[in-house]
Image (spheres, rainbow, N blue to C red):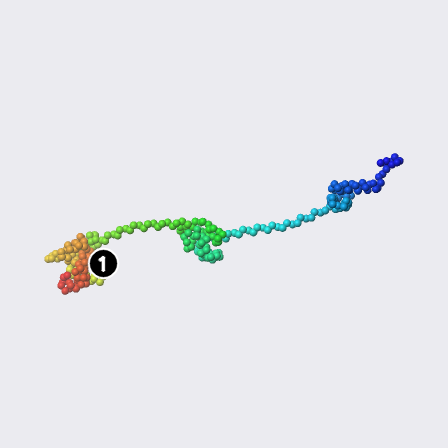
Amino acid sequence: MMSVNGRPSLPSRATIKRAIATAVIVAAGAGLPMITAGGASAAPLHSGSHGHAAQHQSAAVAPAAAPQAATPAAAPAAQAPAGYTVQDGDWLSKIATSHNVQGGWQKLYDLNKSVLVGGPDMIYPGQHLALGDGQAPAQAQTPAPAQAPAATQAPAPAPAPAPKSAPAAPVATAAPALSANASVASLQALAASIVPADQLASFDQIITHESGWSVTATNPSSGAYGLPQALPGNKMASVGSDWATNPATQIKWALQYMNQTYGSPNQAWVFWQAHQAY
């Protein structure tokens, strides 16, 4: 405004203070920040203040965030007990003891029945066994005991071959072991293989006196024939059809005759000594 002398009149100090106060009040009501003389940012004026903001108020420092409690790490899941692979020289009791299996070899067998299909006494190198309830046994194929049946059924035994028919007992018609011209020693050895040992001496005495161990000896008057001087000679056919030339047939018939007639060659020799014949 103009003064009375035509010069602009300056506002009074009271007027300036009222203007500043009014501006402060308006700014406070509008929630506007104020700039201090120093130019630093001041904290905002809140509506709940007493109407005058403190000049040159330093900026508020935000408090540090409270540290969050560390989340505890999840406990590792319990692992199933480790298995065991059977080695050469192992047996269930040894494995159960060395690995502290609760329940001993019986428990170890129960855990692994699907592998030990042959029973607790049949374990083989290479089988994988569970040592506790938390682990199922591996279905590994059982190696052979140098190849015994693993988890498979044992093959059925092959049927026994049909018994062969027993060979027929040799008959006197077989080819002679010795010819009719065999030596006396050979004929006596043949007799030893047929006549019981405790009767052989008496048998030898009778044949020596009757025929002198001649297979074809013939009595010219009676017709008695062969080693035992059978009368007639064809009596010996009851033992074999080759009676005329086979010394074995003649010896068998003579032994049979002595047993049936006198009870034994020993008794026949006793009779012969008394009668010079039998």
Q: How many marks?
A: 1
Find residue 87 and report its horizontal and vertical position in percent: 45, 53
Residue 49 visible? The answer is: yes
Find residue 36 and report its horizontal and vertical position in percent: 77, 43
Q: Is residue 8 left or right of residue 66?
A: right
Residue 185 visible? The answer is: no
Q: Mark 1 packing: few (<14 Cα in 10 Å), some, or many (20+)?
A: few
Q: Residue at x 58, y 50 (%)?
A: 73
Of the residues shown, which amino acid type is indicated by label 1?
A: Ser
In this view, which residue lies farthest toward the top?
6
Q: Height in image: 6 above or below 197?
A: above
Q: Is residue 190 left or right of residue 51?
A: left
Q: Nearer the viewer, residue 217 or 263?
A: 263
Question: In terms of secondary structure, where does tag 1 sit?
Answer: loop
Quarter of the image where the C terminus is located: bottom left
Q: Nearer the viewer, residue 176 or 230?
A: 230
Q: Residue at x 74, y 44 (%)?
A: 47
Find residue 244 and report its horizontal and vertical position in percent: 16, 54
In this view, which residue lies farthest toward the right?
5
Q: Height in image: 148 above or below 258?
A: above
Find residue 196 and report its horizontal and vertical position in percent: 22, 60
Q: Nearer the viewer, residue 139 or 178?
A: 139
Q: Which residue is mark 1?
A: 193
Q: Is residue 173 left or right of residue 25?
A: left
In this view, which residue lies farthest toward the left?
221
Quarter of the image where the N terminus is located: top right
Q: Name which quarter of the figure residue 275 lies in.
A: bottom left
